[in-house]
Amino acid sequence: MTGPAVAAVRRAVRAFLDAVEAPPELCVAVSGGADSLALAEAAAYVGHHRGHVVRALVVDHGLQEGSAKVAADAAAAAKALGADEAEVRRVDVTGPGGPEAAARKARYRALAGHGLVLLGHTLDDQAETVLLGLGRGSGPRSVAGMRPHDPPWGRPLLAVGRATTRAACAELGVEPWDDPHNAESRFTRVRLRTEVLPLLEDVLNGGVAAALARTAAQLREDNEALDTVADTIFTRAGGPDGLDVGVLAPEPAAVRRRVLRRWLLASDVRELTDAHLRAVDALVARWRGQGGVWLPGNLEARRCRGRLCVVSQPTTRGE
């Protein structure tokens, strides 16, 4: 007989697959932790009833001694829980942004290339993401958290708590692997998980993680509505090759900056910050004949004859 936690995880996966157009093969990212193992079992159970082939993808970051065995054990556990295939992919973790960011980028690169990859992010992960966005002041897109379906990524468990995935593993008789990094307070997410969220739960009498997740969902709906309006304005204003200031100027700032963000990203501006976006917006809303705005990648946004354009600069600023 299926226990309540296993049933809850399976319901979440079933609801997710009901809402998307899933390909014949379902891929599941498996770390060996409770969240991914519970997800792998539910994906296999629900997927097989729907005629899907289920493949477990295990990423070995090589950051800890014995990581190859941990990865092999995770693959074996996924197969024992019903996955048709299990594959280990070794990656090199390098690059800027600290070990957390570098490992995340390497992991996503290794998992890419499939039509749908299910990730084990839970309600608690969503709450941590929202708090990170709030703390960094990164705007509504960050505070809106992770999307349940952001192709090729699927997150069926965003309404399921971490306690439920652990209980599901216990019901299945599976011993999940606990990543030692999840206990290291030098990582921001670990401190949010072990210090900040428990304190908020205590001060606000519980329900904080669920409340943060609801806030994220509401913001995603608002963002989608504003983005739809911004898409229409973007087309009216001229598109990627340049924007008509006369079309942009009367629009509310929230819509105008969304148009500018889409335009700048389409113009190959990377690492776009809120400060960059507001400076470019000033060329529309607070035009006083000022010069252009320097942007990452040796680019400059300028206003010329009533239009905005992005031009390349031969050298970086200050050289």
Image (spheres, rainbow, N blue to C red):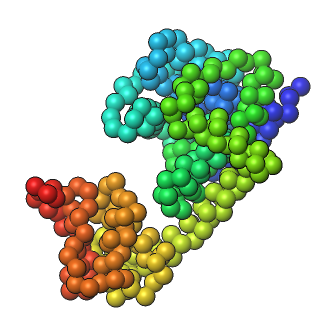
Residue drawn 67% across the image and 27% down it: 34
Q: Residue at x 37, y 67 (%)?
A: 277
* Residue 130 position (above or below residue 79): below
100 or 304: nearer the eye? 100
- Taking depth in this image into account, of 204 and 139 the one nearest to the observer is 204
Of the 4 image quadrants, the one containing the C terminus is bottom left
Place residue 256 in its image quadrant. Answer: bottom left
Would residue 202 appear left or right of 20 to someone viewing this image? right
Q: On the rendered image, what quadrant is the N terminus found in?
A: top right
Give whichever of 94, 74 is nearer the camera.
94
Residue 182 position, x and y percent, is 58, 28
In the depicted view, which residue is nearer to us: 297 or 24?
297
Residue visible at 18% across and 67% down?
Answer: 311
Residue positioned 63% across, 30% down in the render = 36
Q: Is residue 170 above or below residue 11?
A: above
**Quadrant of the rendered image containing residue 193:** top right
Examine the rendering and report whether any part of residue 24 can be seen: no
Please state the horizontal and vertical placement of residue 201, each as a whole percent of the image.
75, 45
Q: In the displayed image of the protein, which residue is found farthest to the right?
A: 1
